[in-house]
Image: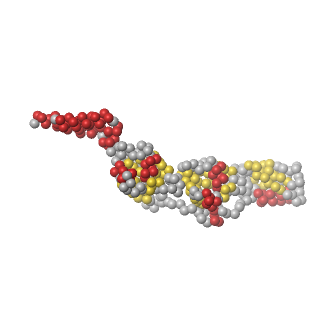
Amino acid sequence: MSGQRPFRSALAVLPLFFVLGLAGPVAQAQFNGPALGASTAVNRRVTPTTDPAILFPKGREIHVGAGDLIAVHLYGSTDYAPVARVSLDGSVQLPLVGTVVVDGLSIHEAERLIADRLVAGGMYRNPQVTLQLMESPNQVATVTGELHAVVPVVGQRRLFDVLAAAGGLPPTASHIVTIYRADVAQPVVIDLGTDPEQSDKSNVPIFPKDTILVARTGVVYVLGAFKTQGAVPLAQNSPLTLMQVAAVSGGPGFEGKLGDLRLIRTVGLERKVVHVDIKRVMDGKDPDPVLQTDDIVFLPTDRMKAAIKSGGVSTLLGFASILILAVQQ
């Protein structure tokens, strides 16, 4: 019985070793934010707009608005050339005319109104008025989302020109662009695509007061025992597989449970978990899964491997010495 005491004492050390070396701080948290209702629409797919009448509407006249700086020119007369700014109430003060409300009028309508006022005042018989828009806070398009810019648009410009003036699409930008237009009930959804030969179909006209939303491209989230964790953007019109994500993330670490990788995918309000043996995928024994937007790739950590990795050679030697001592006794 006395010869078995050292062996039992050595075995008694093993639980302490695992408690000290493997057990780490455990954090528990609970999501306490507002829950989504059963009728909440999530992960909705957007359908590009295909109606040519909406994509390529007829040209529009320039309209005068509050804050515009206008110059009035009279053909054949250099004496009458006032420059005035449209006030907040939409009116403008002009010599020989007085107060004229021009807010919302097109350039041609404002020219005819000023000419009629000059005739009614007995100043000219048949004046030919030309209105020049010198400055305008209204003749702009707003680009938001992954790009932030206010781009001047006098009359109309093309979508590619506006995006280029805003700085161009960054790598994180989606090729699905949404245009919000005041007189269109539904947003105009444009798929920029990646084929240069088809680019003319997506280079639609942009008008003043349009808002262009450049969404963020889809990402796949990488968590757990990878060398690099974070969000991996999806390439436009190109599939992204598990092996590609693993390569971008530096590959799985030594401490990872290669046989228990989990792909977490949210479909509507339901979350699904698929267990994958990433080692079999790397060895070519299992197919390489194709990932989708907002997928979560989670590789759990093996605590024993993590303790060996964090302790290094000293942990291995200590563990081996305990086993040797237990066997010798």
Please give the name of the residue rendered at 89% of the width and 57% of the height, measured from the top-left corner.
124
Q: Is residue 182 visible?
A: no
Residue 195 in the image, given as x and y percentages of width and height:
59, 58
- The one of 324 and 17 positioned closer to us in this rendering: 324
Q: Left or right: where does residue 51 sit relative to residue 303?
A: right
Q: Is residue 130 left or right of residue 319?
A: right
**Where does the image place residue 329, in percent across and percent down from the top left?**
16, 35
Is residue 26 placed above or below 36 in the rendered structure? above
Comparing 275 with 138, the one in front is 275
Location of the N terminus (image quadrant): top left
Q: Nearer the viewer, residue 44 or 63?
A: 44
Residue 215 at x, y percent in the picture: 55, 53
Where residue 190 sits, quadrant-wise, is bottom right
Instruction: Give the mark count.
Output: 0
Left or right, 107 with reference to 276: right
Q: Residue furthest front?
A: 284
**Toward the viewer: 239 or 184?**
239
Picture coordinates of residue 274, whole percent (x, y): 37, 56
Outermost residue toward the left in this view:
1
Q: Could you tell me which residue is drawn at 48 percent across and 49 percent down?
A: 232
The coloring applied to the image is: secondary structure
Residue 123 falls in which quadrant of the image?
Answer: bottom right
Which residue is drawn at the image coordinates 61% and 57% (left, top)? 196
Q: Is residue 48 visible?
A: yes
> Residue at coordinates 85% horizontally, 58% vertically from top-left?
128
